[in-house]
């Protein structure tokens, strides 16, 4: 049996540490999070790994003020759908930005941060958040 | 005919934080009321379907089908427990519809039930999040209200929908619930209070959002033949449709529309041989008020982008051309997740029978229910006729 969250996070490390998804050679579509089957081509799909650049813009966002246990200490925080330059969207927090300053269309880039923790003694989950491209914070994304 | 599916009885518990009642108490209560209402004998019921989202996490109990049969003293009849997040109730109705339509069963007790108040607020929030794509949305900090805030913000940008319009849905639904003895919030709420209520995921405020609720609903669904033995005013299910969409909201091209709602509602109208203008009363899924705005557009009450304005104009008010959520909706009747889809049908049956008292839509003959799961990954539509 696994410690809560360990195996679950470990299985996804490459995706959540490196923003690694996939690309279908048959229909030229990109997917993040990675898919096991191309939903457009199904058995005719040819998926290959793809490392996303981690650059994009804010498609929509919310300021979370009431959060479950794992995020309580971070409120208020910005969570957004980020549209990556490759064309896919993902859901992530926006950091290094005041809630008043975030706007739709804002250019952002990925940064490596602590996401949450599984309870008091549980594992800490690291992965992608995004920050405005104009800020330099010294923690570039790998 | 002969192959029509009818509803011969409905039952509801009061919705709310029911501290003194357990999951099995409320499930039994709704079922018994439905049985009494239909005047059916226990021995005539040949199956149970039950919609529930997450009793395992909310109460520690699963296997609700067997629980319901046992508690109701229904002997050895089969019981089917179905889950489709917030559309679990609608799914239970649809499963019963298909079972009767196929000839496998003749009379089914349909239940929807959820007991949410036995856990604390943050546990409840965690559990509600599993209705979305928990691994790729919830785990990255997107709460369920935040996902609806995503939709609301795009809708505001693209169509000029306002915070006042989001709030007017609440005002309308609370006004309706004030006349619903089963509702969690039986009082009107003024616009100003809604507009100044606490933000939970901007632009969504606490009063744009359905509450944490306990509650259960039940129906007796049966063949037309059986219904005619039981009641003088059976209500018929003219269409039952269901469609799916991506689990995660970020995988949808357009997040201001719910493709599954569009598809299932059009198919339902087509099957029933009706147009949207023929429908007299609606119950739609307003877990957040932006949801009602989007769904009224997607089912064709108004064009895309106009869903906020029709609330201002009163088109969806109780006395409007398209009355939406006479029960108070999820917002004000309450949203015990698995019960909601069954409660929507129960309300519409009361409306079609003319039994909805002070919230009655005059002369209602046809009705539509739209029950969605998650952020629209499941949509289940039913059209009823007296
Ligand atoms: Zn493909």
Image (cartoon, coloured by chain):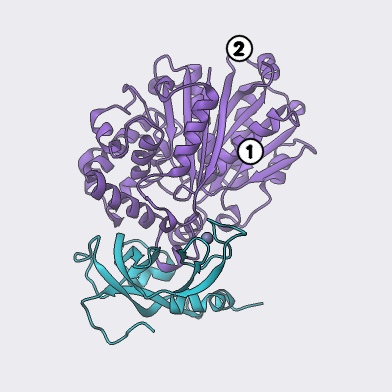
Quadrant location of the N terminus of chain B in the rendered image: top right
Where's residue B220, x and y in %?
Answer: 64, 28
Chain that is coloured cyan in the picture: A
Is residue B329 something that shows in the picture?
A: yes
Which picture quadrant has residue B318?
top left
Residue in view at x 50 percent, y 44 percent: B336
Distance between mark 2 and mark 1 Cα atoms:
26 Å
- Mark 2 or mark 1: whose residue is earlier in sequence: 1
Say left or right for B232 vs B74: left
Q: Residue at x 46, y 33 (%)?
A: B182
Image position, residue A92 (x, y; %): 37, 68
Secondary element at image label 1? helix
Give the drawing colour for chain B: purple
Mark yes or no: residue A118 visible: no
Q: Is residue B305 above or below residue A89?
A: above
Residue to which mark 2 is pinned: B232
Rendered image: mark on residue A95: none
Q: Quadrant of residue A99?
A: bottom left
Residue shown at the point (76%, 31%) measured from the top left: B104
Q: Chain of mark 2?
A: B
Kindly identify which residue carries mark 1.
B28
Residue visible at 37% across and 39% down in the picture: B292
Residue A89 appears at what percent x and percent y?
39, 62
The yes-or-no answer for disc 1 within 8 Å of ligand 1 is no
């Amino acid at each position: 049996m696994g410690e809560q969250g360990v195996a679950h996070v470990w299985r996804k490390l490459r995706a959540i540490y490196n923003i690694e998804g996939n690309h279908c050679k048959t229909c030229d579509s990109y997917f993040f999070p990675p898919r096991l089957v191309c939903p457009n081509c199904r058995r005719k799909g040819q998926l290959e790994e793809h490392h996303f650049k981690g650059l994009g813009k804010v498609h929509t966002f919310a300021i979370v003020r009431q959060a479950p246990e794992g995020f309580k200490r971070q409120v208020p925080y910005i969570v957004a759908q980020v549209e990556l330059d490759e064309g896919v969207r993902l859901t992530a927090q926006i950091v290094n930005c005041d809630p008043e300053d975030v706007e739709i269309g804002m250019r952002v880039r990925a940064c490596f941060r602590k996401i949450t923790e599984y309870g008091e003694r549980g594992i800490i989950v690291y992965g992608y958040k995004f920050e405005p491209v104009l800020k330099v914070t010294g923690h570039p994304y790998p | 005919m002969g192959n029509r599916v009818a509803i011969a009885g409905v039952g509801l518990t009061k919705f709310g934080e029911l501290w003194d009642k357990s999951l099995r108490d409320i499930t039994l209560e709704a079922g018994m009321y439905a049985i009494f209402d239909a005047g059916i004998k226990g021995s005539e019921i040949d199956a149970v379907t039950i919609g529930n989202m997450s009793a395992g996490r909310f109460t520690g109990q699963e296997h609700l089908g067997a629980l319901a049969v046992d508690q109701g003293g229904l002997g050895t009849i089969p019981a089917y427990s179905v889950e489709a997040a917030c559309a679990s109730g609608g799914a239970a109705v649809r499963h019963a519809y298909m079972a009767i339509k196929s000839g496998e069963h003749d009379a089914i007790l349909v239940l929807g039930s959820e007991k949410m108040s036995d856990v604390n607020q943050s546990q409840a929030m965690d559990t509600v999040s599993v209705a979305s794509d928990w691994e790729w949305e919830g785990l990255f900090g997107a709460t369920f209200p935040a996902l609806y805030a995503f939709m609301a913000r795009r809708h505001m940008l693209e169509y000029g929908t306002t915070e006042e319009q989001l709030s007017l849905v609440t005002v309308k639904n609370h006004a309706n619930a004030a006349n619903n003895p089963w509702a969690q919030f039986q009082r009107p709420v003024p616009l100003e209070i809604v507009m100044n209520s606490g933000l939970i995921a901007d632009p969504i405020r606490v009063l744009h959002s359905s509450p944490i609720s306990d509650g259960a609903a039940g129906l007796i669904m049966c063949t037309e033949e059986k219904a005619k033995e039981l009641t003088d005013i059976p209500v018929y299910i003219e269409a039952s449709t269901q469609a799916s969409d991506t689990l995660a909201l970020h995988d949808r091209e357009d997040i201001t529309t719910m493709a599954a709602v569009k598809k299932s509602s059009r198919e339902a109208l087509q099957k029933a041989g009706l147009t949207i203008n023929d429908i007299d009363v609606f119950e739609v899924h307003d877990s957040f008020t932006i949801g009602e705005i989007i769904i009224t557009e997607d089912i064709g009450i108004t064009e895309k982008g106009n869903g906020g304005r029709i609330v201002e104009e009163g088109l969806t008010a109780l006395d409007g051309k398209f009355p939406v959520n006479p029960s108070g909706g999820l917002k004000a009747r309450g949203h015990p997740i698995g019960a909601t889809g069954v409660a929507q049908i129960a309300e519409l049956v009361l409306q079609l029978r003319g039994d909805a008292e002070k919230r009655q839509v005059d002369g209602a003959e046809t009705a539509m229910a739209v029950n969605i799961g998650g952020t629209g990954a499941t949509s289940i539509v039913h059209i009823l006729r007296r």
